[in-house]
Amino acid sequence: KQEVTQIPAALSVPEGENLVLNCSFTDSAIYNLQWFRQDPGKGLTSLLLIQSSQREQTSGRLNASLDKSSGRSTLYIAASQPGDSATYLCAVTNDYKLSFGAGTTVTVRA
Amino acid sequence: GAGVSQSPSNKVTEKGKDVELRCDPISGHTALYWYRQSLGQGLEFLIYFQGNSAPDKSGLPSDRFSAERTGGSVSTLTIQRTQQEDSAVYLCASSTSVGGAGAGELFFGEGSRLTVL
């Protein structure tokens, strides 16, 4: 059974600091890894999708890396802003099913 | 539609009543998923559809839960004889493809918040 762990569970930083969020998974036979953002009371918004053959994906201030062999992914958010405050979840796909981590709740202080 | 649409957004019901939750996926998306998110918990997989077929129903918590999808589009999740432990946010997601290399990006709806009194 795939286990996904996200560390830390919560993170508070001053505005402008770079964020580093970690995700690890136990079964490296994944097809892809996806990072999501969830605001309180809302659904999940897809941020980045990394296919298993890729090492990283970038979108604006966001960069996600994938090391499939070691079962790890890292999401970097550059120059954080208060609007980045949210819970960030990673999910990996084995066959058809996505397995989610519990998330990292980020607070960016103005 | 532009995104995944779910209704109702909020539902309060009494214990023992039946509820239906609806999901309208992104047009053309063949894969549809239901997840449950309980307060303070992670996302729990319930069921997925490829077209109108549900190859894996193993995530459904009990036989009070059922789901169907018609026309390869709209899906309904039905909970019979609701219990207080069913209170959660039920999230629907759709994708262009299921599994395999190049599996599609998953897009979520805003969820249906169910409260069982």
Image: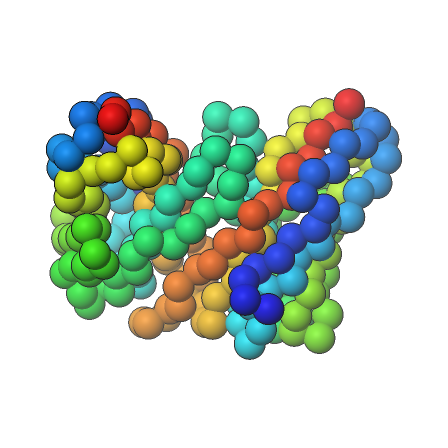
Residue B74: image location, x then y, percent: 69, 65
Residue A103: image location, x then y, percent: 35, 35
- Horizontal relation, residue B112 to residue B33: left or right: right
Residue B10: image location, x then y, percent: 70, 38
Q: In which quarter of the image is the N terminus of chain B?
A: bottom right
Q: Which residue is drawn at 67% across and 43% down?
A: B9
Q: In which quarter of the image is the C terminus of chain B?
A: top right
Q: Which residue is drawn at 40% across and 68% down?
A: B104
Where on the picture, by quarter, is residue A14? Answer: top left
In this view, the residue in front, B73 or B55, is: B73
| Above or below, A4 relative to B66 | above
Where on the picture, by quarter, is residue A50? Answer: bottom left
- Horizontal relation, residue A79 to residue B34: left or right: left
Residue located farthest toward the front when viewing the structure as drawn: A110
Q: Let me know if residue B29 appears in the view.
A: yes
| Above or below, A42 relative to B67 | above
Q: Which residue is drawn at 37% across and 44% down?
A: A37
Q: Let me know if residue B32 appears in the view.
A: no
| Above or below, B113 relative to B58 | above
Q: Residue at x 48, y 26 (%)?
A: B40
Residue A88: image location, x then y, percent: 34, 40
